[in-house]
Image: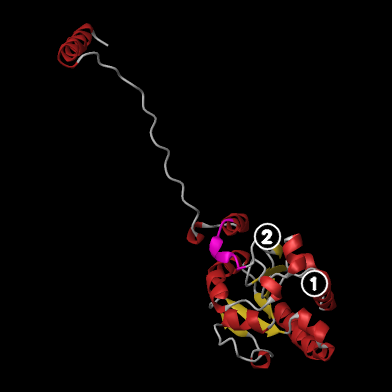
Amino acid sequence: MSTSIRNRVESYLEWSRELYGPVYFTATTPEPAATHPMSLSSVTTLEELRLVCETAEELRTDLPGTNLVFGVGNPDADLMLVGEAPGENEDIQGEPFVGKAGQLLTDILKAIRFRREDVYIANILKHRPPNNRDPLPEERRRSLPYLHKQIELVNPKLILCVGKVAGSTLLGLDEKTPLNAMRGTFHAFRETHELMVTFHPAALLRNPTWKKDTWVDVQLLRKRYDELGGRP
């Protein structure tokens, strides 16, 4: 600081002291910028989406203390499977489709030459509903944007919905639409994907006679997968 500037500053301080008493200068720390949760539109990876889902209260059901069941599998899969909601075992392990229904799903995939780790598996809901009930319409409405983002990030060639709830939710159909009205064809989904619907593995455990129809469905799925150039 030059002598003339210093003299002017000292003169000003002396003048201030005479008028107002001692003058003190205190350093102030600016308030930290407010942090806001990452919006879905800004999410670019599955890991970022998982972090968003961890704190998204709208994804929770009315069953307290549940764990997030986000999704599992190959993040670059050409085939994505979508179920309806986690059950007790899924809630405990934090992974969709475990237990007897999960083992049957793994066996079905193996029968059409897929390993579980080759595909990506998720649910409409990411938290367990009480008593393993069907997801409520409001729960599905709140959860759907997060699933849409998950599908966008995986970007599969084909989506297989297992169960009426998953199929009607993603296709935007009335929840009373019968499963057989959705089976046997490939539906256009969000203009960039094809979607097929079949029976839920848990339903097959209760009604083994439906396994024959499921076998027809998944063979058709495998054929279409190969036609679209899915990874071997």
Q: Please state which amino acid type lies under the numbered disc 1.
A: Gly
Q: Considering the image in quadrants, where does the C terminus appear?
A: bottom right
Quarter residue 177 falls in = bottom right
Tag 1 secondary structure: helix
Towards the viewer: 57 or 208: 57
Question: Mark 2 or mark 1, which has the lower sequence index?
Answer: 2
**Residue bearing the label numbered 1:** 102
Quarter residue 80 falls in = bottom right
Q: Say whether residue 6 is visible.
A: yes
Which stretch did the figure color magenta? 55-62
Q: Say whether residue 118 is visible.
A: no
Query: Can you say whether 227 is above or below 65 in the image?
Result: below
Query: Can you say whether 229 is above or below 12 in the image?
Result: below
**Residue bearing the label numbered 2:** 67
Towards the viewer: 42 or 173: 173
- Magenta-colored stretch includes residue 181: no
